[in-house]
Image (cartoon, helix red, strand yellow):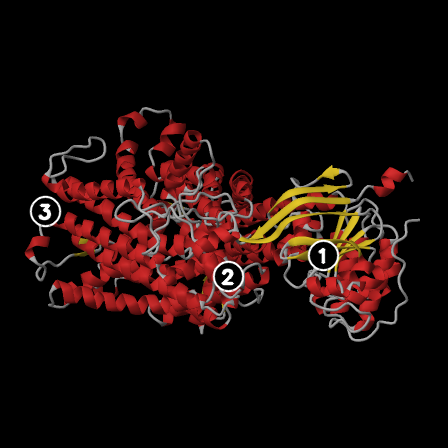
Amino acid sequence: MSTVVLLLFTGLGLGALYFLVAAGLSLIYGLMGVLNFAHGAFLTLGAFTGWEIARRTGSDNWWTFLLSLLVGAAAGAAFAAFTEFVLIRRLYQRHIEQVLITVGLSLAAVALFDGIWGTDPVFIQGPAWFKETTEILGARVPNDRFVCIIAAVLVLLAMVFFLKNTRYGMIIRAGVENRSMVTALGIDVRKAFTLVFTIGGAAAGLGGVLASHYFGYVSPMLGGSLLIFAFIVTVIGGLGSLTGAAIAAVAVAVLQQFANFYLGGTGDFVVVLALALVLLFRPSGLLGRTS
Amino acid sequence: MTTDTDAAGTAGNASATGTDTKDTARGPADTRGTETAGRPTPPGRSRPTRRTIAGAAAGLAGMVLLVLLPLLNLSLPGVLPGPTYTPGSLQLLAMCMLMAAAALTYHLLLGVAGLLSFGHALYFGAGVYGLAIILQNLDIPLLPAMGLTLLVVIVLAHVVGSISLRVSGIPFAMVTLAFAQAGSVIVGRNPDGTTGGDEGLTLRTDNLPDFLVGVVNTRNLYWLALAVLVAVFIVVTWVQSSRAGHVAAAVRENELRVRVLGLQPYLVKLLIFVVSAILVSIIGMVFLLLQSGAVPRAMSADLTITLLVMVVLGGVGSRWGAVIGGVFYTILDQRLTTLANSDAIDALPDILRVPLSEPLFILGTLFILVVLFLPGGLTGTAQRLAQRRNRRVRGTGDDSTGMDRTATSREILEESA
Amino acid sequence: MSAAAETRPILTLTGLTAHIAGQQVVEDVSFTVPATGITALLGRNGVGKTSTIKAIIGLIDRTGAVELDGVRIEKEPTFKIIRSGVGYVPEDREVFSKLTVAENLRLAERDAAPRRQLVEELFPDLLARSAQMAGTLSGGQQQMVSLARALLNTNKILLVDEPTKGLAPKIVAEVAETLAEAARSVPILLVEQNLHVVRQLAGGAVVLSGGRVVHTGSALEFLDDAELTQRHLGVSADPGPSGETAGKTGLEPARKGAAL
């Protein structure tokens, strides 16, 4: 029983990270039709800047941790806004070229990170409480899992609030459904594009800082490995659906943990199998548009 | 995506200078202002011109040169590590040709069928690792081993392809990536020690014919790579100009219309997918022989991205673009690594040195610049320059170097009318 | 009003040519839309009527000149064209199904002072359904949302594409009535297959065939000419079942937008 609980919480923690990356990917794709290969780089930049801040201000302090979260999110947001404004915007509506540019950007960015911070993983220290465990139903759950889960829930709530209660949120919801009709109402969707990219980048950057604590290290490869799972989560959840991404993120991460434990390390494989099954029976994903 | 037309094959292909009567009846073939260039015409319609004959002659001469290269003492300082008869140079040239061939298979996916796959390396890796594992564990000679590997790849491509093609466009890209990643993870986990994990698997040479083993026989491997490149080029051309190829191109243009006509886009896409997987796996098998070992990179997403970069750099939609992109990238990759470690770069101030000492940074930035400013890649830019020159010389906007690549696909789209 | 302002067309198309996925769908289309009344855009299925409308506002790639109220707009992006005073009511309504009725309308508000009261008066049913998800509305109700969106703002012209498609006769009558009412203050270019409705509403007509303009002139004269209608529309346009609606709709002929 305690193993199950531990696996569950580990899965939820990992799922929180997947969600933070997948949420941005899903909205960006849903609204803009862009597959953002560089999203992992947003995460990695967030993780590194968060680490730099923590390193300089005393890394086992709660305030430092919160500060690093803010800085990481800001770094991710800035990188994302820059990407959209300088690169993606020029290729308006040319989706394949946009994907290609994000591929090129991810190559260049990771190489740049390699150059600045080196290719070896750097080990992270956080507030001491993270390393401690809390007992739940007989399982000793590391506390950093809770931080990830709470952060992701807060981000989800904030995003849903934004989408439902602001004009730009309304524009984004409408645009995900039917972008050309939004322009035919006289609305300049390009501002919504930058906004969506920035929000996605902020979530990814935040996720990067959390990921560095969850895994215990930062490295230029951090974003890339999470990105692939974020893609899977996005497809399973349904492109353009925030709640779909949330549900799929939890499902995929928990499935992965259980498969790794009970089926001899085949977690990654099982996840791809799940993807295959979803594609066979519901190609638009769990909550995606069925058209 | 608007892709450029296939550049005229100058080696043994009549470039199309005539236009189909059906097409001229419709009016100007190209309605989008993209480059038009020659397409290989179906037999019976070519009109050999002076350009075609000159092109064919040049192609033949080039081919002869390539065949004789290992016997010659040519040097290309800065490009090749030594004269052309040395094993080091031959190894590099052979790698260039294999990569060019792999880029051609990717062109078939992306340029012809419009399938943006991020999982092509799965089949390359399957060829590499499949053959390596079979040779390691079974005592059978080379050709049966290759045949067996090929069988495995065909099954794999069918299964993965038929699932992945349930979606298209960006979701398809994501799904192919996921499947390739699964393969990559399996290789990395080294189940029962079969794949050698991170260190890879050395090639077991016991059952290989002697002329393919050993540094002294590098030139045989060079000739093998050359033969593979030529064969792949021929097969890709054949598929492209076959009916299936035209339907695939029509699907790329307007899938809905094709479906309305009662044709089956799914089957055509699956066919192209499997064919390109088979071809790239064969290339992988030769790669194994050339490198004398299997490495995890052979099945990585990085490799697929490398192929994508090659095709885009060369010019999407163009066979020659793929070939040129493959060669250019392989050489560039090698030279950039040397450049990045050079003293000249070390001497630069940090803000320049850090990015420039990473070859992938330069490559990634170059790629971005090409996508932004040179659509159509190297071949597209060359075509545009040539057309500008022609126009100045002839004084008319003479773009009649051939059919619009959509012409035959449009024939298919209009067939029901 | 001066004679010149009255006679200048609100919309002038010159050499409009558009293609979708390599197929030419609109070829060298030129016509004008007068500044008052309803002008019908007619033609068989698939001749390019919707594509023409989309080409005017730039939803599909096109070449050619588009002049709105004397200003050339073809180089502007779609949203700017709309902002300069175009109301667009698309074929198939295209309401946002995951937004409520109220949100759909709020999204469409462009002006500083949108005409909410007018819309509430014209569409009381929608007011009652403010909080309902637009995806759960009936076809007729969605059409009302689509019309309301266009009427919220002060426009120079309305582009209305097949507003009666797939609707029951009673709703068709309501839609026609709403259009007639709207036409009193804004000119309308109306794509319509229902020739009854065209008869009631339209002053002028532009007929397309094969992506080209084949006839312009008075709508009534065109519809009364059996040979012309047979040739270009493939149906006879006698007042009688047109194949689109069954029987008369029982509406009195609407005022054809006489300017006040």
Q: Which chain carries label 2?
A: B
Q: Mark 1 lies on which chain?
A: C
Q: Mark 3 falls on what kind of element?
A: helix
Q: Mark 1 falls on what kind of element?
A: strand
Q: Mark 3 points at which residue?
A: B215
| Label 2 environment density (alpha carbons within 10 Å; few <14, some 14–19, many ≥20) | few
Counting residues from the N terminus, which is met first, the one under dot 3 or under dot 2? Answer: 3
The disc labelled 1 sits on which kind of residue?
A: Val
The disc labelled 3 sits on which kind of residue?
A: Val
Instruction: For marks 3 and 2, give the CA distance.
Output: 56 Å
Instruction: For marks 2 and 1, give the CA distance.
Output: 24 Å
Q: Mark 1 points at which residue?
A: C207
Residue furthest front in the image: C227
Decide if residue A35 is in sight here: no
Q: Which chain carries label 3?
A: B
- Labelled pair 2, 1 in contact (Cβ < 8 Å): no
Q: Name the residue under label 2.
A: B414
**Coordinates of residue B45 in the picture (x, y in percent):** 35, 54
Q: In this rendered view, identify the residue nearer to me: C15 or C229.
A: C229
Q: In this rendered view, identify the residue nearer to me: A63 or A82.
A: A82
Decide if residue A151 is in sight here: yes
Instruction: For marks 3 and 1, give the CA distance.
Output: 77 Å
Q: In this view, does C217 lie above or below B399?
A: below
